Image: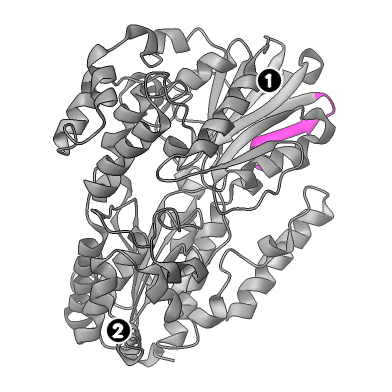
Amino acid sequence: MTRTILSEKATISADLDCHGLFGRREMDRQGRFLNTERLTSHGNMRGREMLLQIMESGLSGGDPYHNIFRLITLDGDIMTVGSPDFTPPGDPHEGPEVIDLNTIDRIFVFGAGKGVQHTAKAFEDLLGDRLTGGHLIDKKGGTRILERIGVTFGGHPVPDEGCIEGCKAIVKMCEGLTERDLVFTITGNGQGSLLTYPVDDISLEDLQKTVYIFQIEQGGTTVDLVPIRNHLDQIKGGKFSRFIHPAKAIHLFGHLMQSYDDLLYRPVNRWLHQLPDFQTYEDAILSLHRWNAWDKVPESVRRFLLKADPAQETLKIDEFLQMKSRLFCIMPEHIGFLPNARKKAEEFGLRTYTLYEDFEMAGAEAMHVGKVVANMAIHSLEQADPFVPPCAIFSRGEMVVTVGSKKGMGGRNQEYVLSAAMELAERGGTSIIMGSIDTDGTDGPGKQFTDDPENMDVPVLTGGIVDYSTARRAKNKNLNIFEALRDHNTSKLLHALDDGIEATQNLSTGDLTVTLILDEHEHT
């Protein structure tokens, strides 16, 4: 089964190469997952192979590298940007953006996000010598793959000095931009941390403390963290566009595909830092109070937010409309990872269901959600309710992990599957398999906070896969799932069980969780 995945992807990439579009690296041809053989060497091997193929199909379908070549075409000196698949519904601009490159002096690419380099690589391969340069901020732990575009690696989910250095490089390159320059920006998940340039009143240390207290210790949601970070930063909250102006800007977003009006005129934007922001200093203060963090964050943060300096306010709609820009989505949901994953499941003859999407689980503790979904699967296996086997159940969106003072290594997708594994061990039979991944290739902060020396030899996982055998094998190896969850130190255990998924990095489209409920004869 694994060999089939590799063969299909190699054929697709070879077809693209023969047309001279791009030279994919060998790693890309082999799919995103790096340890498939180990993941499918135990438990319900057939079910594990099916689940990994389904998730791999989802990841391949949402590949932004390929989509850039569908979005942008070159015909001599004429560049055309846009197509119905990538244009926000209701965009008042008629048709694609057609640019005579004879009128353009320089072309730059700027951006930030986990795995953002893979999208930018398409610009290097497409534009060649026409590309002047640019700069990106990627998550630490990756490898530089770009030649013309600069790369800085920064901390996530808590920003570090690398994030600031990357922002300074972007701001420096924006100096002297004119109306004859063209700028592409790329936005991916993780930008909220990676695109960090604190205002002069706030030190990096105080900003780090604020983010850690709010999101790691208190378990605050990313949605509620956004107004805080936007107002403590020189580049977030639409201020990015101030540095780019007066150049022509084409902003490329990830999987978000709201209507044009939603993006610009309603308060749903939140973290697209090239676009106007509807939030205020008061919203930031309310978020800190909502998560009982106001009295815990540094005094400098409280003082700055209460001061509410209008000169540091985020970009508002009237100012943005004076800028020359177009908006496109490079990973639209209707051709993204969820439709492709469901299609693959249906090829296996499985009924498909979507349990929850996007922000329906925002703020929910990952281990609690895993327990609930596992019990829903068990009940469906026994009663054919609420889901009728054989089936695949899909969910997307980002849960949370409230870590408190623990210093482990793990992530929300890992806690989701391990809490599910404890339930499956009780009465799940052999035909339920559950997996969960972060599509960028890294689940959680990796080694950023861990104080366990044994974690230094553990790879950064993108999630995990479990079945009836997981808890039993953990017991046989004297590994305690409950303690791993309690201490938020799950990577070491999953890696030791060969149930932790390792993957290459790419632009994030959120998390993907898949639960298979198969017939009993699908055991091996």
Q: Is residue 157 left or right of residue 170?
A: left
Image disc number at residue 182: 1
Tally of marks: 2
* Residue holding disc 2: 471
Residue 251: % across, % down: 55, 27
Question: Contact (CB < 8 A) between labels 1 and 2?
Answer: no
Q: Magenta stretch?
A: 70-77
Q: Earlier in the sequence, mark 1 or mark 2?
A: 1
Task: Indicate yes or no whether the magenta region holds residue 29.
Answer: no
Image quadrant in which the N terminus is located: bottom right
- Label 2 sits on what residue type? Ala
Q: Residue at x 49, y 42 (%)?
A: 332
- Residue 182 visible? The answer is yes
- Residue 388 visible? The answer is no
Residue 438: % across, % down: 44, 57
Badge 2: few (under 14), some or many (20 or more) residues near its Cα, within 10 Å? many
Q: Residue at x 26, y 55 (%)?
A: 403
Q: Residue at x 46, y 85 (%)?
A: 46
Pick the front one: 99 or 412: 412
User: As displayed, is residue 107 above or below residue 360?
Assistant: above
